[in-house]
Image (cartoon, rainbow, N blue to C red):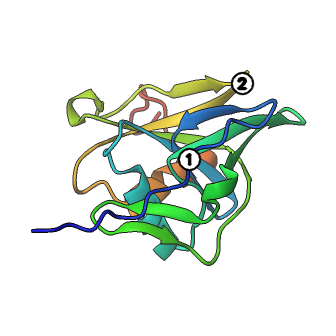
Amino acid sequence: MDYVTPPQPPAAAPPPSGTQAIHATLISFLGVGCLIVGPSGSGKSRLAAESLLLGGKLVADDKVFLSLESGMLMGAPAKEMIGVVELRGVGLYKLPDTASRQVIHVGVELVPLEQVERLPARHTQNLLGVNIPVIRLPVVPHTNALFMMTAVRAVQEGRILPTDWRPGT
């Protein structure tokens, strides 16, 4: 059987001066920049695509260029990949409404289920000298954008209780 070679993204350009390229996906949801990291095939693009149905906007898929602007961590897509997301099993998909850059407020790290604590300690990640809170979510079929965005909003709004919290304290 003959197979048609799917379209491939253009060759990656070198990072713009003053930036650092990382393998990640960046979305904007209610103005909150959410950087999704994890191994290849872990579901970063799927979570981004699902978040679009909830009102999120894609900023960058697969490669995010990080930079500092006025002390804020910023993320932007590779110029040749603006508005493009890869949907595994479907192909490259061009989105009509995307953001060109975004302040990064929180990170989501996709990890194996056995590495996710039930009541986790707070995690942070230092990127270009800026510490951002990080939520660790399991790489399992039921990790979806609604669950992710609920967690992101709780962290952003300071509604995550300390691990030693007990009722009545």
Percent x, y of residue 112 = 25, 34
Tell whether 32 sits left or right of 54. right
Mark 1 belongs to which amino acid? Answer: Ala
> Along the horizontal axis of the image, is 10 left or right of 5?
right
Residue at x 73%, y 59% (from the top left corner):
100
Pointers 1 and 2 in contact (CB under 8 A)?
no
Q: Is residue 132 above or below residue 159?
A: above
- In primary-sequence order, the first of circles 1 and 2 is 1
SS assignment at label 2? loop
Residue tagged 2: 128
Q: Nearer the viewer, residue 22 or 34?
A: 22
Q: Which residue is mark 1?
A: 11
- Secondary structure at badge 1 equals loop
What residue do we see at 34% from left, 33% from top?
119
Decide: few, some or many residues near mark 2? Use Cα within 10 Å; few <14, some 14-19, many ≥20. Answer: some
Question: Based on the displayed image, in which of its 4 quarters is residue 110 positioned?
Answer: top left
Residue most toward the right?
Answer: 70
Q: Pick whichever, 58 or 83, lies toward us.
A: 83
Give percent across and percent down for residue 71. Answer: 85, 32
Q: Position of residue 98 (x, y in %)?
A: 65, 68
Q: Position of residue 136 (x, y in %)?
A: 40, 36
Q: Residue flagged by tag 2: what amino acid is it?
A: Leu
Horizontal placement of 84 versus 39: left or right?
right
